[in-house]
Image (tube, helix red, strand yellow):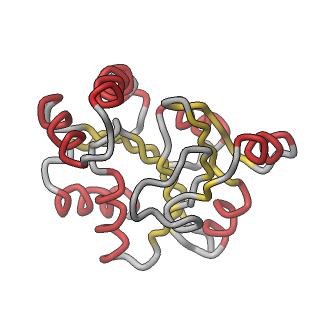
Amino acid sequence: MSGNLIILSGPSGVGKDTIIDAWREINPKVERVVATTTRKPRLGEVDGVDYDFVSVPEFHQKAAIGEFLEFKEVHGNWYATPLNSMENLIASGKIAILKIDVQGAIHAMHLRKDAISVFILPPSMEELEQRIRGRGTDDDAIIEQRLINAQDEVAFANKYQHRIVNLDVDMTVALLEKIVE
């Protein structure tokens, strides 16, 4: 039994993790592909659950031997989609979620024509800024950079098969369920 591959993108702070967590609560087939990153864990993040946290040399070694579907540098850190874990989820009938930035997503869409691509939009840029500031994890310079990047990322939304404005998490999850049916 084969599953689905979902490419899920959106600007930092739009609620991607919250959406995935809520979706997993109502659908046991939903699994996030745990990405590999060189960034340091945030408070409360668990290695192997939130991300596979690795050193820069280890990351580049894995990339060199073809362990990643795609990899990109974002906000000064490297992120990648591990190929084996993604394929294993799909093969086991899961809905494998790739939560990746637009650069990686566009590349992954070209490599995986079977993927369903979804871009999550904020209700407004003002709301997005409030969400990012509300996390309390970044200083003002990083927040400003994330907001600049968000403008660039939103410009790519039309490259995705589906676009959802995240006004309400439950409504967003209901729309995602309809998309994969």
Q: Is residue 120 visible?
A: yes
Instruction: Name above or below for residue 132 compared with residue 177.
Output: above
Q: How many marks?
A: 0
Q: Nearer the viewer, residue 168 or 73?
A: 73
Q: In x, y percent, where is residue 103? A: 53, 29
Q: Which quadrant of the structure image shows residue 142? A: top left
Instruction: Name above or below for residue 31 compared with residue 168.
Output: below
Q: Nearer the viewer, residue 43 or 72?
A: 43
Q: In x, y percent, where is residue 89? A: 61, 69
Instruction: Name above or below for residue 99 compared with residue 111.
Output: below
Q: Nearer the viewer, residue 138 or 90?
A: 138
Instruction: Name above or below for residue 151 compared with residue 52.
Output: above
What residue sits 32% from the left and 63% below the top? 177
Q: Is residue 154 visible?
A: no
Q: Is 39 positioned to the left or the right of 66 in the image?
A: left
Q: In x, y percent, where is residue 90? A: 62, 66
Q: Is 86 positioned to the left or the right of 76 in the image?
A: right
Q: Is 26 positioned to the left or the right of 117 in the image?
A: left
Q: In x, y percent, where is residue 56? A: 71, 41
Q: Which quadrant of the structure image shows residue 53? A: bottom right
What residue sits 35% from the left and 23% below the top? 145
